[in-house]
Amino acid sequence: ALQSSKDVNLQITEPPIVQGIESNEIIIINDIDGNLILPGTLEDISREVVNGKSLIITAQEDLNQIGISWVLPVELNEKANNTKVCVKVINEFTKQFENNKCFATLRNYFKTVPKNSTISVIEADDSSPLLALGNRGKGNVVYYGILDEQSDFKTQTSYPIFWNELLNFLAETGDINNYNFKIYEKPLLDKVGVYDNGNKIAVNLLDEYESDIAKETIVLDETGFVSGISEEKVVINLDLYLIIFAILIMLFEIFYIKVRGDL
């Protein structure tokens, strides 16, 4: 899922020489050989997390044997069989499952107990966290306990979306929809360039309407967008005018007859 994402700059490295610990915002430990991990590698990763980076640890069959338990946000116990995978907390990376909270099945998994201050986001039938989010210093540690080879989740279209949303959440990039809009939706952005209102916004003029910056000026106030020109259809009742006109004609005829002496 990550290798196919154009939004992720993925760097894959394998022990014993692990590169990129300091240069990447999110570190993922996935399917590693515990015998190849050098002493100090996990300490280096832990130090980076304490300083603000995010760490994702994915479950593997021998996870409880590779000396990584002290970094996990959960306590690992024995393995169990056959469970539904159900969302317990709806947030930025689980919102797609809001209408289908039990979205997958899992044949094998580790029974787990959340450590202090750990949030259990996705759980098994026995309430074991299958995705848990904890803090370590200034950073985040995520336990992803869904063994992909033991679950149907990886075959679902929601799988790459989930990973993309999780990485966005950890990287704090926000929702791309907050930045992807037509220029005429933001009338002050009428020239090509980069705008900075606390967040940087790049502006491109893509079509005739958006490129027409000679349109009537539109002012922005604190209450919203106000246009200098508006057009509204108004229905005018002419009955009163017709009655007045008829009365005037009658008065004129009476006056004319009186002048001729016929009245």
Image (cartoon, rainbow, N blue to C red):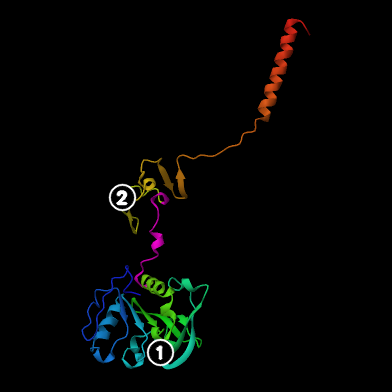
Q: Image quarter for residue 197?
A: bottom left
Q: Image quarter for residue 79?
A: bottom left
The answer to whether residue 48 is seen in the rendering is yes
Residue drawn where x is 67% and y is 22% of the image: 245
Which of 148 and 129 lies nearest the eye of the viewer? 148
Q: CA distance from mark 1 to mark 2?
A: 53 Å
The answer to whether residue 111 is seen in the rendering is no
Residue 58: give x, y in percent of width and height: 36, 83
Which of 84 and 66 lies nearest the eye of the viewer? 84
Mark 2 lies on a secondary structure that is: loop
Of circles 1 and 2, which is in front?
Answer: 2
Q: If you read the primary sequence from the N terminus, does the residue marked by circle 1 or circle 2 appear first? A: 1
Residue 188: give x, y in percent of width and height: 38, 48
In which quadrant is the N terminus drawn?
bottom left
The amino acid marked with disc number 2 is Val
Q: Residues within 10 Å of mark 1 (few under 14, many from 20)?
A: some
* 196 with respect to 131 (left or right): left
Mark 2 = which residue?
Answer: 192
Residue 38: give x, y in percent of width and height: 23, 88
Q: On screen, 50 above or below 225?
A: below
Q: On screen, 41 above or below 217?
A: below
Q: Which mark is residue 151?
A: none
Residue drawn where x is 32% and y is 48% of the image: 191
Residue 147: give x, y in percent of width and height: 40, 85
Residue range highlighted in magenta: 170-185
The amino acid marked with disc number 1 is Glu
In which quadrant is the C terminus drawn?
top right
Mark 1 = which residue?
Answer: 75
Residue drawn where x is 68% and y is 29% of the image: 240
Question: Does residue 144 belong to the magenta stretch?
Answer: no
